[in-house]
Image: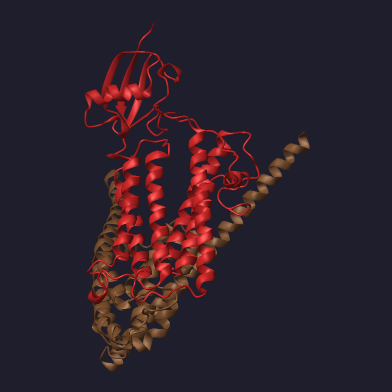
Chain colours: A brown, B red
Amino acid sequence: MASGEEDGTVEEKETNNKKRTKGAIATAWLTFYNIAMTAGWLVLAVAMVRYYLQKGTHKGLYRNIARTLKFFQTFALLEVGHCAIGIVRTSVIVTGVQVCSRIFMVWFVTNSIRQIQNEESVILFVVVWTITEITRYSFYTFNLLNHLPYFIKWARYNMFIVMYPLGVIGELLTIHASLPYVRRSGMYSLRLPNKYNVSFDYYYFLIIVMLSYIPLFPQLYFHMLRQRRRVLHGEIVVEKDE
Amino acid sequence: MKHYEVEILDAKTKDKLCFLDKVEPNATIGEIKSMFHKSHPQWYPARQSIRLDPKGKSLKDEDVLQHLPVGTTATFYFRDLGAQISWVTVFLTEYAGPLLIYLMFYFRVPFIYAPKYDFTTSKHWVVHLACMCHSFHYVKRLLETLFVHRFSHGTMPLRNIFKNCTYYWGFAAWMAYYINHPLYTPPTYGEQQIRLALTVFLFCQIGNFSIHIALRNLRPPGSKTRKIPYPTKNPFTWIFLLVSCPNYTYELGSWLGFTLMTQCLPVAAFTLVGFIQMTVWAKGKHRSYLKEFRDYPTLRSPILPFIL
C-alpha cells in the first residue's frame, strides 16, 4: 500500500514536470516567434521609408517589398496553429479569419493583379498593416518577457481606432480598383460547360467580399473597443484606490 | 395533504417574479409553468426554462414537485428561452422550400437562365430523373414530418427557422441551378454511372424510411420514453447492429447517390456539409445512449460502421 502511494506521487510529479517543460518550450518558441515577426515588419517599414526617400514616389514600392511582405504575412499562419494547440488563448476561428483575410489580400488581390500594384490604396493598407503589426508583435514580445512598457500597451489599444478604418479603406479601394482587370481577364474563374457542373466568377466573388465588410467590420471594431475598455478600465480602478 | 409554496426568481437578476401558494405536492413542472404563464402572459410555457439552480440544467415538464430536492417552500429560477416555434412548423417550411425551388429551376421559369430557354426542358434524361429523385426525397421528408416522426421537444428557438431555411433553400437553389442549366454536362460514365447512383439512392431512401418507422415504433404515441433501438424483421434495420444512428448513415448514402447521379460539385458540397452536421448529431446521440443505458451494445459506432 505504501509503495502504491509513492508510485502515485511519483507519477504526479512526472506529469507536472512534463507540463512545466511544455510550458517553458511554448513560451520560448512564442518569444522567438514574436521577436522574429516584430523584426520582419520593422525591416518592411525601413525598406518602405528608404525607397520613398530615394525615389520620391510610391510607384514601384510594392514590387520592391513584395517578397518580404509575402514572407512575413504568410508566416502568420502559424498563429492559427498556436491557438489550435492551445499555447495562445485566443479563438482559432477569430485568428483564422483575420489571417485568411490578410493572405487573401496579399496573394489573391495585390500579388496576382499587377495593374493595381502602384495604386495609392495599396500603400495605404501596407503602411497601416506595418504599423499595426509592429505594435502588436512587440506587445506580445514584451508581455512574454514580463516587461511591458506602458506606451506599447497604449499603442496597441488605441492606435487601432484610427488604423483599423484606414486599413479597411485601403483594402476596399484596392479590391475595387482590381475589378475591371479581373472582369477583362476572367482570372480564377470557371465557366460552363464543364464536367463538374459548377461555375465560379471571381469578379462577382470580389464584389461579395467587399459587401461582407459591411457586417464584419463593425463587429470586429466594437469587439476591439470593448477589449480596450476592459484592459484600460482596470487601470482606472487601480488609480482610484491610490 | 401538505401543500407547497413555490417562488420563481429570475435566474440573472434574482428578482421575485412569481409566488404560488397552495401548490399540490404531485404538481408537475409543466403545471407550474402554466400557472407562471397566467401571471406573465408573455412567457408561454414553451419559452420557460425552470431550474433549481440559476446556472443549472432545465427541469423537465414531467418532473414532479415532491420528488425534487426542495423544501415545502420551493425556489425555482427562470430563464427566458426566447420566442419559440414548433418543430413541425420548422420542418415543413425548411423542406417545402427545396421542393418548390428545385422545380422552379427544372421548369426554367423566367429570369434564371437566358430568355431563349424560358419554360424549356433539359434534353438529358438524367436531369428528369434527378428532378424526380430530389422531389421524391423532400415529399418523403414532408410526409414523415406529418405522419411518422414523434418529437421529443415541441419547440425550438425562433431564429432557427431563418438559419435552417437559409441552409436548405440556399443549397437547393445552388444545386438546382447547375443540374437544370442548359449547359449541364451529364455524368462521365453515362448510363452505368446513373444506374448505380439510382440504385444506391433508392436503397438508402428505403433504408432511411425503415429506420424512421422503427424509431417511431419504439415510442408509444404521446410519450417521451427513450429505448435502445434494435434490428427488426426488416433487413434494412439490421444496420442497427453496427450503428447508433443509421438514419443518418442512409441519408449520407442517399446524397452520395444523388451526387454520383448528377456529377455536380454543389451537390457534393451539400453532401459534405450535411455529413459533418449529421456526424456531430450522431456522436451526441451515441454519447447519450452510452450514458443512459449501461447495457448499450459496444459494437455500435455513431454513424459509420467501425469508422466514425
Report whether residue A87 is seen: no
Q: Position of residue A120 (x, y in %)?
A: 24, 83
Query: Residue at 47% of width from left, 59% of height from top?
Result: B255
Count of numbered circles on the image: 0
Can you say whether B68 is above or below A133 in the image? above
Taking B170 as reference, is A77 left or right? right
Q: In which quarter of the image is residue B105?
A: bottom left
Query: Residue at 35% of width from left, 22% of height from top?
Result: B75
Q: Position of residue B284 (x, y in %)?
A: 50, 44
Report whether residue A219 is seen: yes
Query: Residue at 63% of width from left, 44% of height from top?
Result: B241
Q: Position of residue B178 (x, y in %)?
A: 36, 70
Q: Position of residue B80 (x, y in %)?
A: 30, 35
Residue sitting at the far bottom: A55
Residue nearer the viewer, B149 or B270: B149
The quarter of the image holding the C terminus of chain A is top left
The quarter of the image holding the N terminus of chain A is top right
Can you say whether A235 is above or below A213 in the image? above
Residue sitting at the far top: B1
